[in-house]
Image (cartoon, rainbow, N blue to C red):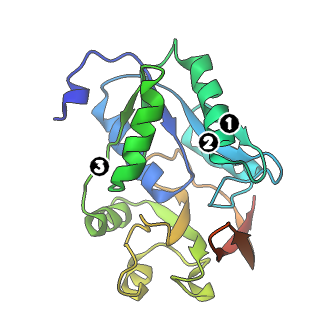
């Protein structure tokens, strides 16, 4: 058992993305039964009312969390927010709740730079980051996700890594078998994102309807890149 679970713990919040890594991490964390979980936290676009990167509508996020049965809090991120703006919004939120929480839980698996960044930001408020899935083999995680009865839809794919046809597919063994060489089975490098609609952490499945597949292009000072999104309605 890691040192962080051996400490005397108070309470945690869980950073919820709507996707499979979050669902697996939440399931693992709840099974540890080491400290109470105050609520789930999700960042939402202030302009579009959608979950960042996953593109899930806020109303469907609400329905998903209702099916899970936990409290949800949201942080609204301005359109085209700089890193400084994003950090300030998140810092203000965590500052507000720092007196009631001691730990913040994430579904990250193996991106060391992201882990260091999260730890550095939370350390300013004396909050510790927890990573239940850290350094677990991603092929093993993907298989366990399916074997444990979780169900998810691929809702966002990096157009430079995967074709349009991959978007809207079930995250199952057939999807995993179709992945090109170099694409992580869990999409840990941002190759794809998912929406989980059933599994061990759900009291009942999320009801949703698949709509059109849309393409959205993004520009940065260094490059232009695009994602395919499968739009969902509740």
Q: Is residue 108 visible?
A: no
Image coordinates for residue 213, horizontal then vertical, percent: 72, 79
Residue 117's disc is none
Please give left or right for residue 114 compared with residue 85 in the image.
Answer: left
Q: Look at 27% across and 15% down and name the residue there.
A: 8
Dot 2: few (<14), some (14–19), or many (≥20) neighbours within 10 Å?
some
Furthest-front residue in this view: 221
Rendered location of residue 135, percent (x, y): 25, 54
Q: CA distance from mark 3 to mark 1?
A: 25 Å
Of the numbered discs 3 and 1, the one sitting upstream in the chain is 1
Q: Which mark is residue 74?
A: 1
Residue 134 badge: 3
Q: Is residue 12 left or right of residue 44?
A: left
Question: How far is disc 3 from disc 2 in space, using C-alphas?
Answer: 20 Å
Answer with the quarter of the image where residue 73 lies.
Answer: top right
Residue at image location 44% in from the left, 81% down from the top: 175
Q: Mark 3 or mark 2: which comes first in sequence?
A: 2
Q: Secondary structure at mark 3?
A: loop
- The answer to whether the residue labelled 3 contacts the one labelled 1, judged by CB atoms less than 8 Å apart, is no
Mark 1 and 2 residues: CB-CB less than 8 Å, in contact?
yes
Q: Nearer the viewer, residue 210 or 96?
A: 96
CA–CA distance in space, label 1 to label 2: 5 Å
Q: Secondary structure at mark 1?
A: strand
**Mark 2 highlights which residue?**
42
């Amino acid at each position: 058992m890691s040192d962080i679970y051996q400490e005397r713990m108070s309470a945690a919040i869980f950073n919820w993305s709507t996707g499979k890594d979050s669902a697996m991490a939440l399931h693992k964390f709840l099974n540890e039964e080491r400290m109470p979980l105050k609520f789930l936290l999700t960042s939402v676009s202030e302009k579009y009312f959608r979950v960042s990167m996953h593109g899930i509508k806020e109303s469907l996020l609400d329905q998903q969390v209702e099916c899970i049965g936990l409290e949800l809090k949201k942080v609204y991120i301005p359109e085209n927010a700089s890193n400084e703006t994003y950090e300030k919004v998140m810092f203000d939120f965590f500052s507000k709740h720092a007196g009631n929480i001691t730990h913040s839980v994430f579904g990250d698996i193996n991106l060391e730079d992201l882990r260091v960044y999260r730890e550095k930001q939370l350390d300013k408020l004396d909050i510790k980051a927890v990573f239940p899935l850290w350094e677990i083999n991603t092929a093993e995680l993907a298989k366990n996700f399916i074997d444990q009865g979780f169900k998810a839809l691929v809702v966002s794919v990096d157009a430079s890594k995967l074709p349009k046809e991959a978007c809207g597919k079930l995250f199952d063994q057939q999807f995993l078998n179709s992945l090109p060489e170099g694409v992580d089975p869990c999409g840990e490098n941002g190759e794809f994102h998912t929406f989980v609609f059933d599994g061990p952490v759900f009291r009942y499945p999320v009801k949703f309807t698949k709509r059109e597949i849309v393409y959205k292009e993004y520009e940065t000072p260094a490059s232009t890149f695009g994602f395919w999104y499968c739009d969902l309605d509740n």
